[in-house]
Image (cartoon, rainbow, N blue to C red):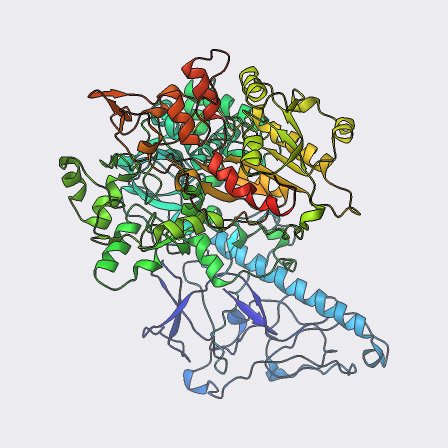
Amino acid sequence: MEEREEGREVTGRGSGELKADTEGRPGRARKSETTRVRAGDGQHGRLKDCTHGCYGDTTKRLPGTTMPSNTSAVPPSEGPATAMDPCEMAPPTPPEEVDPSPRRKRGRQKLEPPETEAPNTEGEGVRLRRRPVPRVPFQAGDPFNVSRRQKEEWISHWNRETERQAHHKAVMSVMEELSEPEFQKEEETAASLATPPPQQHTDPASPTIAMTPEPVVRGHHATPRESEYQDGRGFGLGCLVFGKLRGFSWWPGRIVSWVMSGRSRAADGTRWVMWFGDGKFSVVCVEKLMPLSSFSAAFHQPTYSKQPMYRRAIFEALQVASTRAGRPLPSCDGGDDAEGGGAELQKQNRKLIEWAMTGFLPNGPRSLDPPDEERDQYKDGYPEMWTEPEAAYTPPPPSKRPRKNAAEKHKIREVIDEGTRERLIQEIRQKTRNMEDICISCGSVNVSLEHPLFIGAMCQSCKNCFLECAYQYDDDGYQSYCTICCGGREVLMCGNNNCCRCFCVECVDLLVGEGSASAAIIEDPWNCYMCETRNTHGLLRRRDDWPARLQVFFANNHEQEFEAPRLYPPVSAEMRQPIRVLSLFDGIATGLLVLRDLGIQVDRYVASEVCEDSITVGMVRHQGSIMYVGDVRNVTHKHIQDWGPFDLVIGGSPCNDLSIVNPARKGLFEGTGRLFFEFYRLLHEARPKPDETRPFFWLFENVVAMGISDKRDISRFLECNPVMIDAKEVSAAHRARYFWGNLPGMGRPLTAMVNDKLDLQDCLEHGRTAKFGKVRTITTRSNSVKQGKDQHFPVYMDNKEDILWCTEMERVFGFPVHYTDVSNMSRLSRQRLLGRSWSVPVIRHLFAPLKEYFACN
């Protein structure tokens, strides 16, 4: 019950909602018919007043004073009285004799000079007072001369004593399991205040007081807790499981209480699951759950290779499992690299997966059982509401963090179960909700931006997935995941040979209409919702300006803000000098080729390259004008001083270990990903001194399909955000890339020139016919030139299918014909050189403003 004194609330037994109770108790007069009910237990406790005048102890007590003997004011110097239960010792009083006048809640007792002790009268009765505190004699005049600090110490001491006593009473009531607690009501206050039940006289050294009791929840009745998930179907609180939701792989999670989710209880046969990776909650049927011990059957390697969130979830689940099994992992500073970053973290992850695949030896699945503290649904749900008895009276320290608003709290408590999106879509069909208010990818209402392709919104989590997967293609040339939700287990591939988009069955049936996916499977060829002439299909409406929105989506996806790069004013024509270039990871000298095509004079072109075929092409096509310096890791500060100064530093480190298409990638900090830091090092070595005013430019390039954490790290080191440019706007091939740099006008729209070959047919030799308008990204793999879901060759010749010739691939990239035809290289070797190179029209678009700074022919 609760005892409120001087505005402070001490937690004990009995708090909850208030209801009216018409039951009376024989032999006692009632002043109130109000009862206090504990939420959820359905038991009414009677709120009564003691008819013997026992209103509880509501008078303040300071060190050196005694408590009053009745409700009237008594001087603090009055002598002690015998401590006993006042309700047992008081004489019975008829109901009609009860004074009906309302009681006024007592305020702060003033400090007064001590008075002489008043003698007890015969009719005074027993004082309503518990065990008295020792009296401290005061000299005359002391109360008037007590310092303010001493008064504050007295009040603090009194508060601690009061709260400690109230806590002990509450503990005793829990242990004695009182069946019928008694309450009293203060009539003039707006809220009903509960007072402690009569406390039995107990020795201070009694084991009942000394033992550590069960923790008590603040603000709730301390009754025996109802156990959860007792339907006999397994999967109790704290169990580690794999759960299956439609459209997703078997995902690791943990069984939690409904209290933790902040929603209602789960029905029999269902469980609340908190998913590892994103921390969201779902209600899942037990038929769609399997224990984590079935790891080998539920683990999905393709999803693990391509989805960073799934990798994070697996790592977190196995981390908990290893801790339970008694083999905790050594700590390592991974940060966001849990998605696939640091080498040490990846090594631990591989060891954990091998351990799980072998059956969690040596102790087996038994070692994954949850500990006792995780089986407590209240402690698991609201740990901050639990207080140890020894520290019950200690107030929490003031929070140094700003208080979160209601919207942020709502985001934390959001629960997206299997039927959330279906339920919200149904509300949209009934016109009770707007399509722009929900994320059409997952059903979340915590939206942060509009979907770039369709009418609807998108949450932050789905935005990150879209950034990673929008330009991720499988070996068949199609997108790896659904265009709408960036997920899906079963996808429909567009039958248009020039389109590479996929739509999952779940999104089609939900947004377009039930049975639409089955109809699309029968239809051959089936044009997707991005290729159809109509832009509306059920609730799925394609935006008319989606190309521009998609460009803006990738241009404004920056989580970090940096200062604008330094702007250099154009140099007057008579002051312009030839450019000096440092090209790292040069490839086949695309930078030099573009500078010469633009007519910019090149004074020196220093290139770092290790591929012999690339070096051969550069030496032959540029007639020895390139100074090759070997491995970038061997270039030092002294070399930069000897070869420089440089006006332009360009480069694009290998993307093998950064692209999420590669399942064995090592990330930015291992393998070839570390070569980015060589670019960063030499860029700072080549920068002009602070007092120099000469223009200095730089450019760094890499793939779009990289992890969010890798992109964020690159931007943090280079202190700028990238721009995304897709070569399909100025060439006959798709090739989306990120570019970081300080070149003027990098974010301006990409515009094709008159001589750019935008269609594949324009790139073919005479007598050959293109089957597609544009080809997908050409990489170093030989099968990357095949197109469509059926792996068609892109060209017809003599009524037969044929692959792209090397000269045709060179036209697609914008290179001169036979540019790579040196040293009797094979067709596959030439394709590998082209697959690692830059698109010439894109680099020309970026380098064009340099004509305002350097001498031109």
Q: Quadrant of residue 134?
A: bottom right
Report the side of 306 relative to 289 (left or right).
right
Whether residue 63 appears in this view of the structure is no
> In percent of the image, x 55 and y 84: which residue is there?
104
Task: Give the percent coordinates (x, y) of residue 693.
Answer: 75, 48
Q: Quadrant of residue 36?
A: bottom left
User: In front here: 486 or 357?
Assistant: 486
Q: Which quadrant is home to the C terminus?
A: top right
> In percent of the image, x 63 and y 65: which residue is there?
162
295 relative to 18, above or below? above
338 relative to 84, above or below? above
Looking at the image, the residue that sits furthest to the top is 824
Task: Give the percent coordinates (x, y) of residue 71.
Answer: 59, 81
Report the side of 570 relative to 384 (left or right).
right
Whether residue 832 appears in this view of the structure is yes
User: In front here: 729 or 319?
Assistant: 729
Q: Quadrant of residue 68?
A: bottom right
518 relative to 139, above or below? above
Task: Give the percent coordinates (x, y) of residue 656.
Answer: 50, 26
User: In front here: 621 or 784?
Assistant: 621
Report the side of 216 relative to 855 (left or right).
left
User: In front here: 482 or 499?
Assistant: 499
561 relative to 500, above or below? below
